[in-house]
Amino acid sequence: MPLYQYLLRRVIFAIPLVLGITVVAFLIANAIPADPINANLPQSALNNEQLVAAFREKWGLDQPLHVQYLTYLGNLLQGDMGVSIRTNQPVLDDIRQFLPATIELATTAIVVGLLLGVSFGVVSAVWRNSPLDYLVRVFALIGVSFPVFLLALIGLSVLHAQLGWVAGPGRLDFLVQRPPHVTGLYTLDSLLAGQWGTFRNAAYHLVLPSLVLGLYVSGIIARITRSSLLEVLNSDFVRTARAKGQREFFVIMRHGLSNALIPVVTLLGVLYGNLLAGAVLTEAILAWPGIGRYAYRASTSQDFPAIMGVSMLIALIYVIANFIVDLMYFFIDPRIRYA
């Protein structure tokens, strides 16, 4: 199958998916049994019918549900996500402000999880049924089943407050100057500006949240890597490579791991989307000013434009991440190219 045809099919499949996501997200946001008027107007203004009516008219709450959706969809197609009720700023501007922090955290966490997960998975598969294997399997089970927010609380209490091994909440220390805004990623922007002290401080603050999220990801990757590598190591082509006298390390890394990582690559898009969408409590506990913290504040104040904007953003991230994974899968798996 040619590359352009493969990509075209993925794009065509993504269009109804994104449209369906807008419908589901809009219905869920409006099905919440709460009134944004009570959450955003002061108590003294709730008894004023004119102020309440003006608020409903301003935010389109006086329109039927289908009219509200069609209006939102029309604005969305023009790149307009509406205005946040809480911040009174365009939702797109708020997302541009908070998203880089989450991208920086999620990217670091996925790298940490990938390194730990693949390494532990290989060790567990190579030394199957050994004490190392049982230890890795317990680690993977804890990483998958242990609540992420509880890991954040434990890390903040033990590693920061008691031992002082990691930095506290936030992206930078209070007195550290922020780097000039280029990408919004403090580590990258500080490197571009040559601010090495800021880079070290930003990297230091990344350690705890990236470890918390990375442990969750590494547990999943370790289990997938182990099961996939065990299956590959029992394949005929691996036995043939061993029969030819190739070294065991070369057999495992060249023939075994390169084929065992195909399911891991397929899973990366979902895991990366999970990190971006599921870091809400972690960001709230560690005072990380990312999109998860923004979504939490929007939900508590019934800020429907912001809730819809974050929902669409997360959905688009999932679609884009899986599109990139499909593209990688096209190059690493010959069965796709010759299907």
Image (cartoon, rainbow, N blue to C red):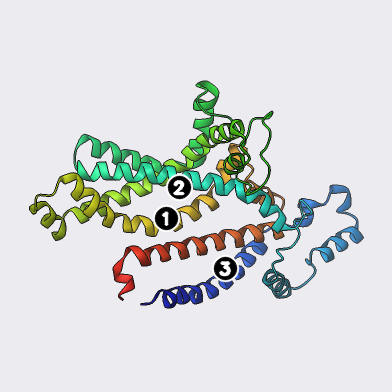
Mark 2 Cα shell of 10 Å, populated few (<14), some (14-19), many (≥20): many
Residue 15 occupies which quadrant of the picture? Answer: bottom right
Tell whether 150 sits left or right of 67. Answer: left
Camera-nearest residue between 80 and 334: 334
Residue 16 occupies which quadrant of the picture? Answer: bottom right
The residue tagged 1 is 268
The amino acid type found where label 1 is placed reads Leu
Tell whether 305 sits left or right of 253. Answer: right
Circles 1 and 3, Cβ within 8 Å, touching? The answer is: no
- Return the x and y of residue 231 as percentages of the image width and height: 21, 55
The residue tagged 2 is 110
Circles 2 and 1, Cβ within 8 Å, touching? The answer is: yes
Could you tell me which secondary element the residue under label 1 belongs to? helix
- Return the x and y of residue 339 as percentages of the image width and height: 31, 76
The residue tagged 3 is 21
Q: Is residue 72 visible?
A: yes
- Return the x and y of residue 77 as percentages of the image width and height: 67, 72
Could you tell me which secondary element the residue under label 3 belongs to? helix
In the picture, the disc for residue 18 is none
Q: Is residue 32 visible?
A: no
